[in-house]
Amino acid sequence: MDWSIQFYYDKNLNPVFINKFFYFLVSRGVKYNAKGGGYSILAKDTKKDIDHSEKEVKESTEKLAEIVDTYLKFDLRTTHLDIILNYLGEVDIKFGIYIIPVKDNKCLISFEAGEHLIPDEKTFLIFINLCKEVFNRLNFVHGAFRSQYQDDIPLNEEDFLKKLPNIVNFYSKPLVDKLGREKLLSAPAKKVEELENGGIMLLVCTEQLGCPDELDAVRLHLGYELRYV
């Protein structure tokens, strides 16, 4: 099963943010084409689309600057960027980054993975930790785990809070205040972590296919009525 960690960015999408985002990923050990790479730039005018796969597997992280520069020449309000990256460290993880424009020049940023790329709990936790660091540094509004069978996360804060918590959830400080910090911190989850930006990461379990009993317990604790996501 494919899945992703999606974040909502509620400020105007611009070159400063895009460069900051990729610079931070590289600073955390993310590489380009260390285990295979490629990218797609999908424009409103499909004749201008770019779809590129690297012919040779050879770490070339410096090429990220060229890819980003090419992407920034497009209209960010209507252009998707999909890129394959590698996170090298204690384990090697191949994953995708999707930058998806939404209304009013805002965007969803999706860390794309799946069972075939994240084979065990250790790798899952390392990948989620990378997502947590990005959420903490770049001040997204909210984020959550989504399987390939689920819709994108809601953009509106209230709509997001109405959704049942998933196996991984990220709340900015304003959302933490609405849900209740102490209630979140006392949730019967595998891990609840306060972040430097005042937000909270709620990790219910590490089972990529879901953990019904643990999810039900956390949802009831937070005051949700049990129903399908």
Image: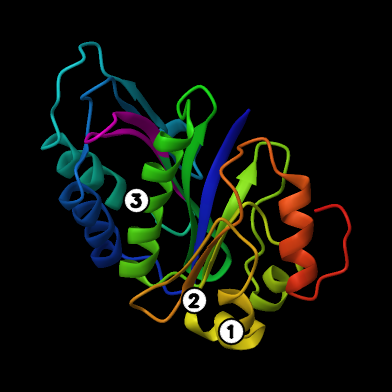
Q: Mark 1 points at which residue?
A: 182
Q: Judge left or right: residue 42 versus residue 104.
A: left
Residue 169 place in picture, x, y as percent:
57, 61
State the residue in front, 82 or 184: 184
The residue drawn where x is 77% and y is 46% is 212
Q: Which mark is residue 172?
A: 2
Specify the amino acid type for callout 1. Answer: Glu
**Alpha carbon separation for disc pair 1 and 3:** 25 Å
Residue 21 forms part of the magenta stretch: no
- Magenta span dominant secondary structure: strand
Note whether residue 216 is visible: yes
The residue drawn where x is 28% and y is 52% is 72
Residue 184 place in picture, x, y as percent:
60, 75
Specify the amino acid type for callout 2. Answer: Ser
Give the mark, 2 or 3, whose residue is nearer the N terminus: 3
Q: Mark 3 points at which residue?
A: 130
State the residue in front, 101 or 219: 219
The residue drawn where x is 58% and y is 65% is 103
Identify whether 213 is placed above or below 177.
Answer: above
The residue drawn where x is 46% and y is 42% is 43
> Residue 193 occupies which quadrant of the picture?
bottom left
Q: What element carries label 3?
A: helix
User: From which residue to which does the magenta span run?
Assistant: 79-96
